[in-house]
Image (cartoon, grey):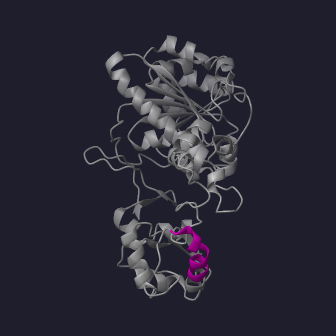
Amino acid sequence: METVSNPPASGPLAGVKVVEFAGIGPGPFCGMLLADMGAEVTLLERAGGTFASQLFGGGRKAVANRGKKSLCIDLKNPEVRPLVLRLIADADVLIEGFRPGVMERLGFGPDVCLAENPRLIYGRMTGWGQDGPLAPRAGHDANYAAIAGVLDSGRRHGGAPWAPPTLVGDMGGGGLVLAWGIACALFEAQRSGRGQVIDAAMCEGAALLGHGLFNLEALGEWQGNCAIDSSAPFYDVYQCADELWLSVCPLEPQFYASFVERLGLAGDPDFSGAQYDSRRWPVMKRRLTEIFRAQPRRHWETLFADSDDCVWPVLALGEAADHPHNRARGAFIELAGVRQPAPAPRLSRTPGAVQSAPPLLGEHSRERLAALGLDDQEIERLAALGAVTLRPSAAD
């Protein structure tokens, strides 16, 4: 696992300037993705922090803020508005994750900002989108995934709906989809010289992630006799003797044949019939449950280590960084004492890199204001008015 120093800005987005209005979940994740790829991200934070900083911790521990520069500023102070507009006028991208109408009330809506900077890519991240009957309503990841139809698909066959926390709506359907939209808009702006507004809704992004499930639904195969909904014995998780788990996924016939042989079941009547005969699946699953429960996970890891049988351990978060494959690939890094995923994907010529540890609240306020042309006297005056915060708070 690599320990990160502070490399110079590099990556395919080096030179791209981003203004991010601090929020929770998908907006910060989107900003992190852009910063990892070399963008200069100025994070506009408020003195009291956000719910995200309370939930995930602020300062150096806030993984989503890595590579960013913190300008702690009171957006409601009239002294601040022209400063923020100057930042926006010099930016390529703006990211905001407020409910519809909030940015307009603050005086930084798309019409105002695009008038100031016609080439600006204005990224809006919400749960339900900028319009529609649910647009003004609150929600969270599981709510968006539920309305998208994909939370139900997370159930084990016959079980309760469930999905990994914040991954489907917030991160995959939210921040990642917004980053994709920003990349597309930046590419188009190179030709047209014009910016545009991106309306990224987590409920729609979650549905997009589930496109293959809608395919299976159309075929009448979802949640019933489906190979990947946990009803099949060869696509499920099994508990071992030490209470640890395995993921078992030999879907393809050649992998399944090898899997059965390796377990010594090649001649067993319960496993010698057609793999996809779903009438036999309950018995097969009961047998496999008993078999895997008889030995610890390490036994099964050793047995399947040199195979393509698609049997792998279910690792806890704390185990993932130490897996030999992840170590060999440098898939995890350590930054400010926090283990975290390295930037991805990997570009051969202009790879991304973490530019710096997450900033303390207001760590770069003076630097960012000076870059706008403010002298020390003016910066101190704004600080005295409470319009900006120049130093991290004692809590950080």
Q: Which sits in the foreground, 126 or 375? A: 126
Q: Residue furthest left?
A: 349
Check if residue 375 falls in the magenta segment.
Answer: no
Vertically, is 262 above or below 318?
below
Q: Which sits in the foreground, 206 or 33? A: 206
Q: Quadrant of residue 214?
A: top right
Give the residue displayed 62% in from the left and 55% down from the top.
Answer: 154
Give the residue displayed 44% in from the left and 19% down from the top.
Answer: 195
Q: Residue furthest right?
A: 137
The reply, left or right, for residue 212 in relation to residue 355 is: right
Give the residue displayed 51% in from the left and 44% down from the top.
Answer: 211
**How far across and how far down the image is residue 200, in percent?**
56, 32
Task: State which quarter of the image contains the N terminus.
Answer: bottom left
**How far across and how far down the image is residue 88, in percent?**
50, 21
**How far across and how far down the image is residue 21, in percent?**
58, 31
Q: Which secondary structure type mostly characterizes the magenta part of the structure?
A: helix
Give the residue displayed 35% in from the left and 79% down from the top.
Answer: 306
Q: Which sits in the foreground, 388 or 337? A: 337
Residue extent of the magenta highlight: 277-288
**How far across and how far down the image is residue 158, in percent?**
69, 62
> How many dots with numbers?
0
Q: Residue furthest top?
A: 115
Q: Is residue 44 visible?
A: yes
Check if residue 280 falls in the magenta segment.
Answer: yes
Vertically, is 148 above or below 184?
below
Q: Is residue 28 visible?
A: no
Q: Quadrant of residue 308?
A: bottom left
